[in-house]
Amino acid sequence: MLVANAHSLEQHMTSTSPPHSESPNATSCGGLPPKECSQNTDRTSLIGLDRACFESALVKLGERSYRAKQIWHWLYYQGARTFDEMTTLPKSLRTRLSSSCNIDRPTVNRMQQSEDGALKWLVQFADEREVECVHIPEEDRGALCISSQVGCTLTCRFCHTGTQKLVRNLDAGEIVNQVLIARDTIGEWPSPKDGRMISNIVMMGMGEPLYNFDNVARALRIIMDGEGISLSRRRITLSTAGVVPLIERCGRELGVNLAVSLHAVDDELRNQIVPINKKYPIADLLEACRRYPSGRNSRRITFEYVMLKGVNDSDSDARALVRLLDGVPAKVNLIPFNAWPGAPYQCSSNNRMHSFADIINDGGYSAPIRVPRGRDILAACGQLKSDSEQVKRNHTGLS
């Protein structure tokens, strides 16, 4: 899956809706014992549990149910990293929680800042697997691009992540923790009502979010919860390469903005560069987009289109794209291809991209050419990868 470049992300930061949201309905814990929610620890992991499971875990540890709301507030509104910081709780309770529950952040193995201000974190989890996440700042706001999987199963040929095989899905806590780490770094605690530097979140990092839908949905509900991080669904965008059966469910259950990694206008080419197209061809994908519950003119579906020199950038491709989008409330992000080591493509020329954009605009669709951010630290569109992966495999035998 592509990670969006800065101005691709900026398009998702222009909503006029307030940054806080209504509280989504909590989902059932399903009666999971607390240890089944933990991450390689004897202590119950609280980060990533939905409201019902969060309360259930604490009750099973002998705590009163009203404590769940207090602790939730400390974790997701105040940003507490230890129970000792939760000063409204009795000291004896803080001690018990410290011994029985885990709210630790994952390890940040490396943080890099681009010359243009973009930040990239290499985050390591308990099993030593890693993902990257990226913050793209603007003057008075910013977007955080987060990952949903370690590696990716899609093998899109222009995407660096696609060269790293899928290792596993992230759980909800590992997804939410990327947001917590970014807010720790930027200093965005307690949750501000406005003036946020993480004003938008995009599921455009490593992995295909719809292939990890349950964990992604649980994480996004935590992020949207009005008593914590409290980001509106209008400020969250989920990007998919086209997992057609789950697109409608995503809109119905989450109501977030949808972005589609299209990149080609015919099945023959898309089969080559976005292999999931062999399973879910363009006609089926576009029909699912037309039915997307949140898709309307006020919340158009974004179609990502990476510009590959001599591959998908002709005038005839542009005209075909206009025809393809007929009946879809759409906007198009034209993304200059960002090179990575061993990449088999080159970026289209500026003149070619502008000619392509003019045809799309004349056809009635907005088609800005995005200016990449974070290229110098491999944080731009299509450049993310756990770049210590190969070194680790060579030294530890992990595969």
Image: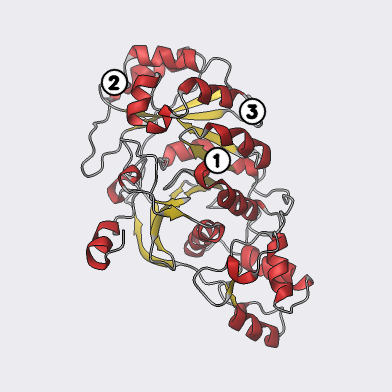
Q: Which mark is residue 355?
A: none
Badge 2 or badge 1: first in the primary sequence: 1
Instruction: Give the side of residue 388 with respect to residue 178, left or right.
Output: left
**Residue carrying label 2:** 351
Instruction: Give the side of residue 222 with respect to residue 107, left or right.
Output: right
Q: Measure the alpha-carbon separation of dots 2 and 1.
A: 30 Å
Instruction: Give the side of residue 108 with respect to residue 15, left or right.
Output: left
Is there any visible trace of residue 147 in the rendered image?
no
- Residue at horizontal 29 percent and vertical 27 percent from the top: 308
Q: Nearer the viewer, residue 136 or 83?
A: 83
Q: What's the image's color scheme?
A: secondary structure
Q: Which mark is residue 298?
A: 3
The percent position of residue 280, horizontal first and vertical second, equals 47, 28
Q: Is residue 188 above or below residue 114?
A: below
Q: Amino acid at mark 1?
A: Thr
- Residue at horizontal 38 percent and vertical 23 percent from the top: 264
- Residue at horizontal 56 percent and vertical 49 percent from the top: 216
Q: Measure the alpha-carbon separation of dots 2 and 3.
A: 31 Å
The percent position of residue 313, horizontal first and vertical second, equals 32, 20
SS of the residue under disc 2: helix
Q: Amino acid at mark 3?
A: Ser
**Residue carrying label 1:** 237
